[in-house]
Image (cartoon, rainbow, N blue to C red):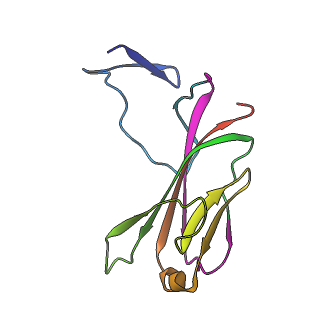
Amino acid sequence: MGTFILNGKEYMSTGKNAFPPLIFSTDEREIGVWIDGKPLYEKTIVKNNIEIQADVIIAHNISNIELVIDLKVFMKNSAQYPDNLFIPINADMSANIGFRTNATNIVAKGSNNFGALSDRYWYFIIQYTKTTD
């Protein structure tokens, strides 16, 4: 299958140096290479007690974003109800809740129906390239 180099370490498709496992972190991490050869980064932003009733601005504190490749959003209920929920991203914001991102923030937009979810934990996993490394 070939090799994969990440952060200077070479990984093989199988064996002792197999491809690295998925690791989620609140620190910025280099996770691969984008089509144009630029490093691909990922960062997980964790928030709780956000009330999604109108536009909610969540700073991601990532500098020099050039292109957002992917944004995934998960919601985790309280410890009493430990299930979680993947929230699809709605570009047109028409399905009562949606998310978008720009160079400085993640913007959550919802209806009054989602105000009751404010006591949950929210995980925003963003993958991106940067203008400078």
Q: In this view, does 6 lie above or below 31?
A: above
Q: Residue furthest top?
A: 2
Residue 24: percent from left, percent from top: 45, 48
Residue 78: percent from left, percent from top: 39, 78
Position of residue 99 in the picture relative to residue 3 (left or right)? right
Residue at image point 57% right, 47% down: 27
Residue 28: percent from left, percent from top: 59, 43
Q: Is residue 89 above or below residue 52?
A: above
Residue 68: percent from left, percent from top: 63, 44
Tell how many labels: 0
Residue at image point 69% right, 36% down: 130
Q: Is residue 8 above or below residue 43?
A: above
> Residue 61 or 92: which is nearer the viewer?
92
Question: Bounds of the magenta span?
Answer: 36-57
> Where, by quadrant of the figure, is residue 92 drawn?
bottom right
Q: In this view, does 76 lie above or below 49?
A: above
Residue at image point 39% right, 75% down: 77
Residue 33 lies in the magenta-colored region: no
> Where, by quadrant of the figure, is residue 96 drawn?
bottom right
